[in-house]
Amino acid sequence: MAFDQSYIEQNRASLERIRAYAKLSDKELQHPVGEHWTVAITLVHLAFWERRVLLVLGKTEREGKLSSFDLDIVVNDISLPVWAAIPPREAAQLAIETAEEVNKRLEEFSPKLLEEIYNHNKRFVFRSLHRNEHLDEVDRALKG
């Protein structure tokens, strides 16, 4: 069975959405998204969870088989003060750089191992699912 390669284009498209938000003004990056988040916090949140995927990819590659770990959603709440302390422009740049790195790793990853990761958690491969979920929230918040 050939592995579905559509994740490549979907991930690239969601990265372009992140790039577009990085062009917002500092004031716009501070725009509220929900009760506690801003556009910048949303972007650094994405970068944080992209780093998780990089860890899963690295560990899976080293071990030659799926290697994942569970994290609880409480990580977002724990991380919020740290994310809020990151200057908005740096948060946007971090989101771009991390998404670029994840896209590159996924595109070059062993298809056999990538399929194992996909079967464990589709969102680890189709990063656009997580990215677009939050970028859609930003869209709604900015439109007001």
Image (cartoon, helix red, strand yellow):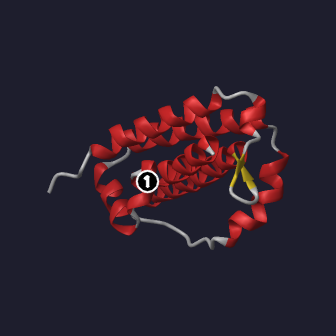
Q: Quadrant of the N terminus?
A: bottom left
Residue drawn where x is 54% and y is 46% of the image: 135
Image position of 21 (left or right of 37): left
Give the structural element (helix, strand or loop) at label 1.
helix
Where does the image place residue 13, in percent across and percent down from the top left?
Answer: 41, 36
75 vs 15, left or right, is right
Percent x, y of residue 73: 63, 71
In the image, residue 132 sits, relative to residue 8, either above or below, namely below
Q: Quadrant of residue 76?
A: bottom right
Total count of labels: 1
Q: Quadrant of the C terminus?
A: top right
- Image quadrant in which you'd find residue 97: top right
The residue sitting at 56% across, 29% down in the picture is 20
Q: Nearer the viewer, residue 2 or 24?
A: 24
> Residue 96 location, x and y as percent?
59, 35
Residue sitting at x 60%, y 33%: 21
Q: Give the image location of residue 113, x and y in percent.
A: 34, 56
Q: Residues within 10 Å of mark 1 (few under 14, many from 20)?
A: some
Which residue appears farthest toward the left when viewing the image? 1
Q: Is residue 97 left or right of residue 90?
A: left
Residue beneath disc 1: 129
Who is closer to the viewer here, 27 or 144? 144
Image-quadrant location for residue 78:
bottom right
Which three-letter amino acid code belongs to the residue tagged 1?
A: Leu
Q: Is residue 50 left or right of residue 114?
A: right
